[in-house]
Image (cartoon, rainbow, N blue to C red):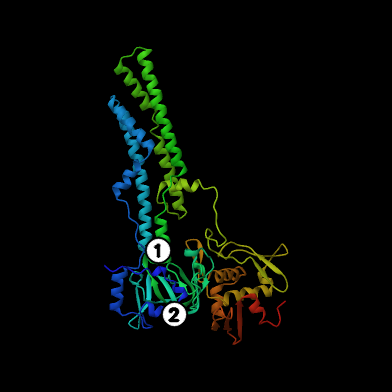
Amino acid sequence: MQEKPKAIEIAWYARHVAETFSALKTRPEGLAAQEAASRKARYGPNRLTDAKRESEIIRFLRQFHNEMIYVMIVGAVLAASIGHLADAVVIIVVVFVNAIIGYIQEGKAEQALSAIRSMVDPRATVIRDGRRSIISAEDIVPGDLVLLEPGDRVPADLRLVRTRNLRIDEAVLTGESVPVDKGIEAVEPDAALGDRSAMAFSGTFVAVGNGTGIAVTTGSATELGRISTLVGTIEALTTPLLQQMAVLARQITFAILGISMAVFLFAIFVRGFAWPEAFMVMVSLAVAAVPEGLPAVMTIALAIGVRRMAARHAIIRRLRAVEALGSVSVICSDKTGTLTRNEMTVRTVVTAGKPFDVSGVGYRPEGGFEANGHLVEAADDATLQEAARAAILCNDAELRQAEGAWRVEGDPMEGALVSLGVKAVHDAGLLRRQLPRTDEIPFDTQHRFMATLHHSHDGKAFAYIKGAPERVLSMCSRQRA
């Protein structure tokens, strides 16, 4: 069997476009259907390797893997051996109820995760045989020409060959919360992952613009696949609660054995009990000392935590993960906002007259304006109104409310500007219908601004511009007071 090439080790981002076409034996017309099928058989489907799942029996038996449970089972056996069948049955019932609760909770988490996976049926637009086609992302093979448009999820690691104002959200891979500008120029071979501007990585999302790229790696060979593989090698650690429970179980076991043996010897040599009677006393004491309700109470407490996390849209696969989260005392994060909500908010508007502080959180278009510590009605300041109008019209983003949360469709920064405009008592949809856009200059890293042309119903034409401050100010000859 022919070995798969280790394409991930090739610095595709350092190769020129022509070299990439040549190395992957593809053309601007894309791969032929027969060649694509051959490569899929060679490289395999474009998907991450699924982790091996436990069988239902193993998952159920794992609920008994606890030192406290072992103590309880031994106690049940001893209770049955001395004729205390009722006590033995109670202990066994508690053990099984504890196992069933844990099994059911983990099963619900697995079902929720499976439901999420089934909802995602990624598709990709490719060029094959000179025709544009929409195929399943699993059918992407190295050498495929993939087309990217706003809102698309990148289906594989791509070497970009054409871009137009392309910006990609790479937060899922690098943690960078701001979309990254992309181009086709080769970069240095030792460039860091976040600086490989000629690449579009699997799992990231197209925020703005469009482009075309050649699939250079697929499946587990992608950068996202490498992370998935590394995660699979992480050693599972015992949580603090389970460590404490193991210590408690050992202490209880030694204490019960020690006290029972002492009582056994006392009964024989001091009180003169017969051997069988002394043994029955020792076993009865051991059974009574076993805390059979403790594992069940602990499991129920963790199950309640799982339900509360689920109410906050967090899926917990294992019960012990709830306790591990509760044990966290310090969270270390970098500046990119990996652990934040990945939202942007306009906090200040600066005009020639005075600066305005803007209140509100996230994209929710609720808040007000303050100047010099006093509330200001946005409608009373013409300059602020005009700035808010420009923020809505010179903008391609949309704000949507779904399930009580406000989300942005498009660039996060543009979403923050739309939210600002709505806070200034503008209806974004109505304003765009009243002043329709008739032409535009899309944002580009070369000229660093975006401009839109609008016409009012009375025939007046006007333009709005937004962009890098130094670029916009260099185009101005005066300011509005």
Q: What residue is pinned by disc 1?
A: 225
User: Which quadrant: the N terminus?
Assistant: bottom left
Question: Considering depth in this image, is 283 or 299 the residue closer to the camera?
Answer: 283
Q: What residue sits 72% from the left and 70% below the top?
A: 354
List x then y, in percent, for residue 152: 43, 72
- Residue lying at the far left in this picture: please name it: 1
Disc 1 marks a residue whose amino acid type is Gly
Q: What residue sits 55% from the left and 64% below the top?
A: 343
Observer-side mark, 1 or 2, equals 2
User: Which quadrant: the C terminus?
Assistant: bottom right
Tell me if 459 is positioned left or right of 477 in this view.
Answer: left
Disc 2 marks a residue whose amino acid type is Val
Q: What residue is pinned by disc 2?
A: 17
N-terminal of the pair, mark 1 or mark 2, is: 2
List x then y, in percent, for residue 337: 55, 61
Q: Is residue 90 in sight in this rendering?
A: no
Q: Is residue 343 in sight in this rendering?
A: yes
Tell me if 444 is positioned left or right of 349 in this view.
Answer: left
Quarter location, residue 260: top left
Q: How many marks?
A: 2
**410 is higher (above) or lower (below) than 319:** below
Question: Considering depth in this image, is 62 or 49 the residue closer to the camera?
Answer: 49
Tell me if 203 is positioned left or right of 338 in this view.
Answer: left
